[in-house]
Amino acid sequence: MSLTGLYVGKADSLRTLFSELKRLGYVVIGYRVVDGVLRLGELNSFDEFAQDVEDVQSPGRYLLVNGSFYRHGPDSPKRFLYPPNLTLFMVSNDWIVSIPEYEKHNFAFFGLKPCDLASIKVLDKILLGVDEYYTSLRRSLVLIVENCISPGGTCFCSTMNTGPRARDSFDLAYTKLNDRLVLEAGSELGLKLLNLLEVEPIDDATYERFRTVMRNASEKARSGFELNGLPEGLELHIESKIYKEVAEKCLGCANCNMVCPTCFCFDILDVPLINGSAKRVRVWDGCLNFTYGQVAGGHFRPDLWARYRHFVLHKFAYWIKQFGTYGCVGCGRCITWCPTGIDLRETVKKILMGG
Amino acid sequence: MSKHMANLIPLKALITHVKTETRNVKTYYVKLPNGVEPPKPGQFNMLYVHGVGEVPISVSDLDEKSRVVAHTVRFVGSVTKTFELIREGDVIGFRGPYGIGWPMDAIVGKDIVLIAGGIGLPPLRPVIREVARNRSAYGKLIILYGTRTVEDLLFTYEYDYYKSIPNTEFYVTVDKPSESWRSNVGVVTNLIKHVNIDPSKSYAFVCGPEMMMKSAAQELLEKGFKMNKIYLSLERRMKCGVGLCGHCQMGPYFVCKHGPVFPLWFISKYFWVDQI
């Protein structure tokens, strides 16, 4: 929740904010342009922070062009808080177990969109207090969120109630209104940061402008289905033929799982080393992968449609039962990064219509 | 040590004995590491072969006094195939016990029918042991066991003992009999309709391949068993055993921690759905 109400400042306040986070010793993580894609990474200077670009997203398509506003790339905070490849421990050949010393980071995400903020709230319900690697990073995490004034072609945060405006759980949220910023603090730290900036309480005209921009953004991020009745609607159609129809286009590549900011499944690799010891590595896995449901001498989901169904039902039905929240934040990454452009919004809509 | 990672760290455990069961099945007797609570019937442990991998194996016997736990392993997967090389005196990695086992309290004073297919007998063997040990605490015990061939039958050296347990019936069947086979032929679920049992005061425990369990559950329902008296031990891919890695999901349930033993009423919404 906002602690301060809304303030207005100059656009270059972001530079001040960035410098202050650096000065406080944070590893600042934000989007940079790498090989024509927005990638999340450590920003050494504010100039590395992607600006003047826009990501054009549609099912199966991603293109970076010149522009003034972007949403996101394939990376989400999950990449840093729950890394794709983490050595859990080593076992020597005489069975001495050693745990690697992980570098202690104070991360500050800079310019994260509300959907990705929401994804951290989802991961909290699964990993906080359970996975110490996550928990330790999360405790010192700073979240500078940019409200989404122009959702992209695959976005549906309005439907998932996760955006386009961040409502809580951030330190500082900002909204770009041409050459000005609307700012609000959501934590003590956010309040301190806000106090460093040249800001003034929002005036009526700017407030109206802000409201209009957010309302229009909200209209752009609807999916065509509603949350009301969604989990039960999907479960009642658990035998829907739509899964088979849609999966005709599915390659089983698990891109959707990998770019999803909340997919938490992992595989365990036990790797023998040349000196006779072995290490155990945790790597991301996904339910669309063939081996995910495979056991010795059998397979519980040999068909792609069944694996795709598990993905859909997990996100919108099972997750509620397991963790009390949806597993989808409406970021649209699984739609954009699907090589064949399978549109989750369309699947859900068709199933709810009784297909 | 992190909670998450501690969960996934195997403890060193000694193999006290290896018993050959069939051409591709052996039973490994593992001394429980200090501090580990003894498993209950129907629970499983994660067994780790150094540098190779880890597999969930259910408990097929337990000696409380010596703290030695039996795991009956069939060599079918990339990890279990390496079990063939394990000998008495070797060291293995151990995590567990995990999951919810058979409802031993519920069956006190009741008749019990155990239905096992193939490698599904080992998880039920501790139930047989418990009933035999406290014979008067339970009603009639009926054991139905089936395998594909005669060579696949497990624990054949115990069958006379099973039959000698008072108030116990033991029926065995094979799909493909040998010439010398003089007992039942066909799938084990065919036997269900022939057994003499009163569903209103009985429990059924089922463990075997999923197709066999579906058909067993169907037969039991037709025989008059209610869904809350039918318990099934499910199999799924499991990498963590503690409800984190996601692989074992059956509908919204993590088989490793919500199961592996489930009453049918609990999972009935999902159990019958193809490839759920």
Image (cartoon, coloured by chain):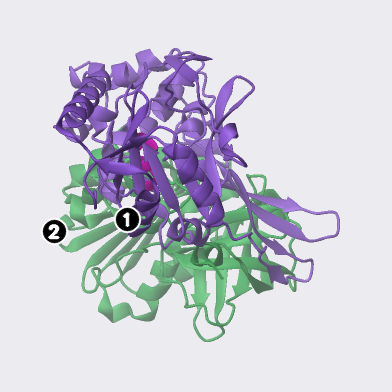
Chain colours: A purple, B green
Q: Is residue B13 visible?
A: yes
Vertical comparison of B173 with A134: above or below: above
**Tag 1–tag 2 contact (CB < 8 Å):** no
Which of the image's four quarters has the N terminus of chain B?
Answer: bottom right
Q: Which residue is mark 1?
A: A187
Residue numbers of the magenta segment: A114-120
Q: Is residue A342 left or right of residue A90?
A: left
| A200 or B253: nearer the viewer | A200
C-alpha gap between disc 1 and disc 2:
60 Å
Q: Percent x, y for residue B166?
A: 34, 74
Q: Is residue A3 left or right of residue A266?
A: left
Three-letter amino acid code of the residue under disc 2: Ser
Magenta: main secondary structure equals: helix
Vertical comparison of A235 with B219: above or below: above
Q: Is residue A162 left or right of residue A226?
A: right
Q: How many marks?
A: 2
Classify mark 2: residues with Cα within 10 Å, few (<14), some (14-19) or many (20+): few
Query: In percent of the image, x 57 and y 64: which residue is there?
Result: B71
Q: Percent x, y for residue B95?
A: 55, 66
Q: Secondary structure at mark 1?
A: loop
Front label number (1 vs 2) = 1
Residue A63 sits inside the magenta stretch: no
Three-letter amino acid code of the residue under disc 1: Ser
Q: Is residue A241 visible?
A: no
| B48 or B70: nearer the viewer | B48
Q: Which residue is mark 2?
A: B200
Using the image, name the chain to which the residue with label 1 belongs. A
Q: Percent x, y for residue A315?
A: 33, 36
| A298 or A158: nearer the viewer | A158
Q: Is residue A317 left or right of residue A55?
A: left
Farthest residue, direction bottom:
B65
